[in-house]
Image (cartoon, rainbow, N blue to C red):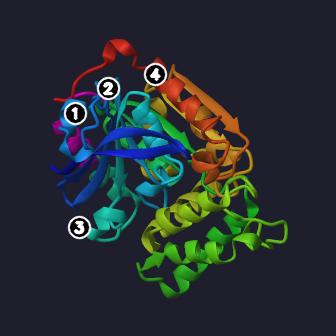
Amino acid sequence: MILHSLIVEQSVDGDDKDHFVKQIVLARGPAPIALVRKRLATIPRGGTALEALDPEECANPTRGVVLLIHGYGQNRYAFHLPARSMCNQLARAGFDVYNIDLRGRGRSGHLGAAKATGPLDFVREDVPTALDEIRRSSGDVPVFLLGHSLGGVVAYAVAADHPDRVAGVVTLGSPYHFTRGSLLLAGVAEAFLMLDRAVEIPNVALPLRMYGTLVRAGQRVFDSRLYPVPIRGFRRGAMETEVLRQHMALAMDHASVSTMRAMFTWASELRRNAGDREQGLFGYAGAFEKLDTPLLIISGKFDDLAPPASVAPAFKRSMSNDKTYRELPFGHIDLLVGREAPLLTWPLIEEWLVKRTGDANRHEAA
């Protein structure tokens, strides 16, 4: 259901702006899921005010549909900051782009969607609900899933569950063997699980906005060589001050203890049963690895939350005949919004998507 439709002028990267048709979309399922849809708009000459134009008449034909899936404890703003927006870049490249707020995050949280009981809520309910709504709005065409961090892990599992509905999967900093390559993160996982077994930590909401506020308040420390913790979430100096502030103020949201528990349990089981496919990807590893779905897997060389050692196994174990792996000089967050992301990450994704759609596939929305 489209709740609101308008034409906006927004930034793609800094002063580089364009016009887009923006729609607020409500997908109704087991939990209400909100999405923001973007398409490039052509504005007629004559100086007519944007609010007086018909959005659908101004919307350009699109070459394919992309669903953006944010990571743990974040929301749709991970892909769309006022100063730098991968979402807008993909729309300008000719794609019909949907940016989801998973349950409990962003607008989905405002609509009353409760916090998740675990990652499988996203896999079995939230993303399929979004795909149903996308089919109604954009037609019955396969959708490219593009996920960051946990969003990419969700995309792998959804592709295994709904191979006929997924045109391809792109992931950025998405661990397939969570905590591999980081002794500190593995230690945190084991410590959490030991504490959880002892006191059974309740499934409370973790306000990661507080972390965002802390980073903004102490940005010089977090972005300096003096920062004492080897887990920062972004490469030092990789983002301009304002972009980092925007990300921490807008993209950081709430997370659930149950999702953290599931992630850490998954990591612990993988370490103990390295060759057991059934332990991987919350039970979806075997089905995912057999898929012949196109894959683009991107890792950050300096990612301290999802090191390349944890990301690359998805590529190595996949049996797809169309799979690509790239390692770029980024940390976890700057893969999306670092100052070099528009020069390295974005063109790589755009070229990959365009190659698998082509002008012949351009279509009007149903």
Q: Nearer the viewer, mark 1 or mark 2?
A: 2
Residue 62 image label: 2
Residue 33 image label: none
Residue 133 lies within the magenta run = yes
The kind of residue on which mark 1 rests is Ser
Residue under pointer 1: 138
Mark 4, Cα crowd under 10 Å, few <14 / some 14-19 / many 20+, is some
Mark 1, Cα crowd under 10 Å, few <14 / some 14-19 / many 20+, is some
The kind of residue on which mark 3 rests is Leu
Closer-to-camera residue (193/163): 163
CA separation in Å, label 4 and label 1: 18 Å
The kind of residue on which mark 4 rests is Val
Extreme residue in the bottom direction: 199
Q: Secondary structure at mark 2?
A: loop
Residue under pointer 4: 354
Asked if the residues shown at circle 1 and circle 2 are in contact, with their CB atoms under 8 angstroms apart, the answer is yes
Residue under pointer 3: 111
- The region drawn magenta spans 128-142
CA separation in Å, label 2 and label 4: 11 Å
